[in-house]
Amino acid sequence: MTSNAWTKSLYLSAALLLSAQMASAAETIKIGVLNDQSGVFADNGGVGSVAAAKLAAEDFGGEILGQKIEIITADHQNKPDIAAATARRWIDTEGVDMITDGAASSAGFAILEVARQKNKIFTISGPGSSDFTGKSCSPISFHFNYDTYALSKLTSEAITKAGGSTWYFISADYAFGSALQRDATKFIEAAGGKVIGSSAHPLGTTDMASFLLQAQGSKAKVVGLATSGADVQTAIKQAGEFGIVEGGQQLAGLLVFITDVNALGLKATQGLQVTTSFYWDLNEETRAWTKRYFALTGGKVPSMVQAGVYSGVHHYLAAVKAAGTKDPTIVAQKMHEMKVNDMYNKDVTVRPDGRVLHTMYLVQVKKPEESAYKYDYYKVITASPGERAFRPMSEGGCPLVKG
């Protein structure tokens, strides 16, 4: 065989393979869970988010419109370049119809940009920056979970009004941490408080000593942790070693997941006030769903990120079924029109900026002696409807919003 013939043969084989892949993709509804499965957010998202997506597919019998629902997954390692490259490959060559989770906000923004370019739906659950429904809003992206505005509003307002008038922040040095500190500062100041200092730590920090010493030296009444995942666990654990609370300062975790409480234990976390969009023990429906989740994960407690992935995939699939097509433009429009209904959302509105108006809960971590059974960690202090918990659409700067 001549070299030209050999080259043509290779091109033909590649074209046939791509054609087969695209034909297969046309016969399936393919959903990609793209998140952190090996780093600081693996516990609150990771493979648990994959399990949550599978539960949503199960709710529809594994297929819609005669098309099998397929869940695929990848670990972007919290690196925006890997996140973008994976999203692009999935869409261009593997026929992925929608992407969910996202993990870190920096990686989430990278996924969003690819999804915007390719006109594919992205349901955001792990990333927390309020900019996803602000300046970076998109017709094809939907924020199914907490954001930095809601986290800041409930937690920082409550603590400041209760006497925590001065704050020192230890914040993650990336998009999420800066947005969380920015939003919290606004609510602290509005409640009559003041931020007197801050430190920024890199992702995956194993030694928070220098940051905690600065916070201790500031004499602030509240040490605000504008970080999450394994980093917030490290900060809380080492704050105990430094005697932060014993010294008279209050520790405020602006994003603490139930998986963090589970990892650290009630003794280390008791009394913490936490804002969440989901708690497994809210009602009979959430408990029944959690039993199904346990079966897929070996009994691990679900976080609000994992519940948000379930909700986003469930709403997407409901919209595909209602629209009678998986065309992303039509499905996205249907997702905006339809109310979100699942095991923990009842007739919840999706705003034009992509914000899903979940009810948000301010909860307090129980003392060890108050916990009556496994994962009985929270007592609900207040429930805040989404219309009150999240930033008004008029203040977000979303270019899709007129007026």
Image (cartoon, rainbow, N blue to C red):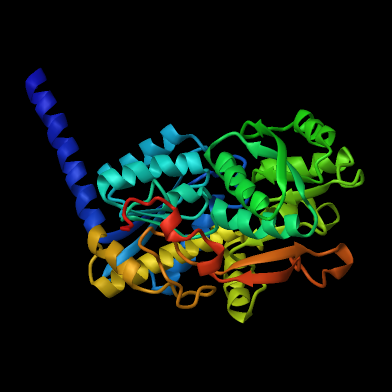
Give me the residue at 83% from left, 36% from top.
Answer: 216
Q: Which quarter of the figure has residue 80?
A: top left
- 52 lies left or right of 97: right
Q: Residue 239 at what x, y percent from top left? A: 82, 41
Q: Residue 120 at what x, y percent from top left? A: 30, 52
Q: Residue furthest right?
A: 246
Q: Is residue 252 above or below residue 379?
A: above
Report how many numbered discs are placed on residues in the image: 0
- 150 lies left or right of 214: left
Q: Is residue 139 above or below residue 177?
A: below
- 278 lies left or right of 11: right
- 373 lies left or right of 119: right
Q: Is residue 50 visible?
A: yes
Give me the residue at 74% from left, 55% from top.
Answer: 160
Q: Residue 182 at what x, y percent from top left? A: 58, 43
Quarter of the picture holding the N terminus: top left
Q: Which quarter of the figure has residue 233?
A: top right
Q: Is residue 138 above or below residue 231?
A: below
